Image (cartoon, grey):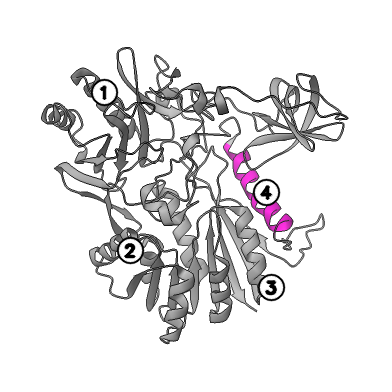
Amino acid sequence: MNIYEERSECTLSNTNRSGRGKNRRNSAASQGQGNASASRQPSKSSRPSTRQQGKEVRPQGASLSAVRPNGRERESAPIEGLPVSKNEETVIDIIGMNHDGEGVGRANGYTLFVQGALPGETVRVRVMKTKKQYGYAKLLEIVKASPDRVSAPCPIYDQCGGCQIQHMSYAGQLAWKRQLVVDNLQRIGKLNVLVEDEEGAEQQGIRVLPTMGMDEPWRYRNKAQVPIGAAEGGLVGGFYAKGSHRIIDMESCLIQHEHNDEVVAKVKELGSHLGISAYNEETGRGLLRHVVVKKAFRTGEMMLVLVTNGRDIPHKDAWIGSIREAIPHVASICQNVNKKQTNVIFGDETRVLWGRDVIYDYIGDVQFAISARSFYQVNPVQTEVLYGKTVEYAGLSGKETVIDAYCGIGTISLFLAQHADQVYGVEIVPEAIEDARSNAMLNEMKNVKFEVGASEDVIPRWKEQGIEADVIVVDPPRKGCDPRLLDTILEMKPERVVYVSCNPSTLARDLRVLEDGGYRTVEVTPVDMFPHTVHVESVAMLVRS
């Protein structure tokens, strides 16, 4: 949940899924997009205008081949002996939902995945694709609706690929996310999860608490990363349609802070007026690639980053002057130059066009400097909840030595340092460690030390130097902990391990290894960092048996 790549986020840009660190060693170059949303439906006044929203624009250069291999869908030979066939219509009961948010049903024992269907529903579907063990079907009619079904408030929900389960009540989302964690612990980790039987008697096992949700989960995102395209009339920008590079032009996103929407809209308007061109993926020509906006919730400061295909910006002074006049919240306007033909958003060069090179915000009592490319959690409200649970599970009294593996820019390390004697943080991305050290100085915290390197290499070296950890905190990317790091933890034998996870399946796998090595998982708390999406964070507490 740290680093320059947003490892904890789901991706609004479906075709550029960085998730939570598929490649940590390239994480400084890529920035994921995230999502989330709701505990209660927003009022009508908070809903975006539908005047122009939902217009699909294929960005210059996003040909059909960007969506389908070789420009067309390959037809596979029909599989004999299946209980259903392609294009057949059937009625099925939805018995569950997979990790992608698709309803799971069975037709005569054959599994079908149905986008948009919810557990407990009876639906009529058309079979679209079949494989030997399972197939995919399109939802045609809801014969019996789930009590958790709601009308998605976003007018382009069916087109945009950002939110997957906005059609599910927030209470239903929280319950499903807890069950997703439970299912992974049991199925993948073969771990015993504590349950209550009808008489209330409890088994021994892992306690999985209810998912910690948001009181106000709309408009929680503090960062927008918007691809830019061209259409008649000027620039367009929004998010990619599901599974494509077609830009859904949008005025408002219900999970973004309103100021982010205002800045993106104003940049598009001013850019169109000044004749700024949009980048063309196919030809490599055109200037404006992405608009990135960061909002500091506590201080109110904002940063605008224009990602361009080259250093020269026509009418730069007029553009900057108009932006400053129209958006007084903006404290920093930066340019990032990315001339590579790639889906990665940021290039290597960033320069300040106006204002400071950072904006400042707080998580709890800890202040952070946020630069154009540094990672900062996109849901500050839930980040404080997540870190609070991490500190609670660490069980600190002020005398402990703590190691924070995968420390990123030091967000968790600095939280822990408020309650520990000494904290050591390690991260493989050099730029992240630079930010971590700067943030420690900013908060005048002298009991925390950061080092660049792979956790599995650095931590054994610390052990050789006589550093013994009472608590080890891990916050790995989606792929989970490196096996050598797990071995290192077992060798160091800290009294407690706190595991912060963005992927229930790799969490379950790694907990199994730690349990086999002499640890006991006491409790797991799911935390909803991204409502309306299928992503769920979890914090697990382990003690040495």
Query: Disc 3 marks which residue?
Result: 516
Q: Is residue 376 above or below residue 206?
A: above
Query: Disc 1 marks which residue?
Result: 277
N-terminal of the pair, mark 2 or mark 4, is 4
Q: Amino acid at mark 2?
A: Ile
Question: Predominant secondary structure in magenta?
Answer: helix
Q: Observer-nearest residue: 175 or 236? A: 236
Give the distance between the C-alpha atoms of the residues marked 1 and 2, in whole angstroms. Answer: 36 Å
N-terminal of the pair, mark 1 or mark 2, is 1
Span shown in magenta: 170-188
The nearer-to-camera label among 1 and 3 is: 1
Task: Decide if residue 442 is on the left or right side of residue 194.
Answer: left
Q: Observer-nearest residue: 298 or 189? A: 189
The nearer-to-camera label among 3 and 4 is: 3
Question: Is residue 175 rendered magenta in the image?
Answer: yes
Q: Is residue 439 visible in the rendered structure shown here?
A: yes
Q: What residue sits 51% from the left and 25% below the top?
A: 65
- Of the 4 image quadrants, the one containing the N terminus is bottom left
Task: Decide if residue 285 is on the left or right side of residue 392.
Answer: left
Give the distance between the C-alpha atoms of the residues marked 2 and 4, in whole angstroms. Answer: 36 Å
Q: SS at mark 3?
A: helix
Residue 433, disc: 2
The nearer-to-camera label among 4 and 1 is: 1
Q: Is residue 43 above or below residue 40?
A: above
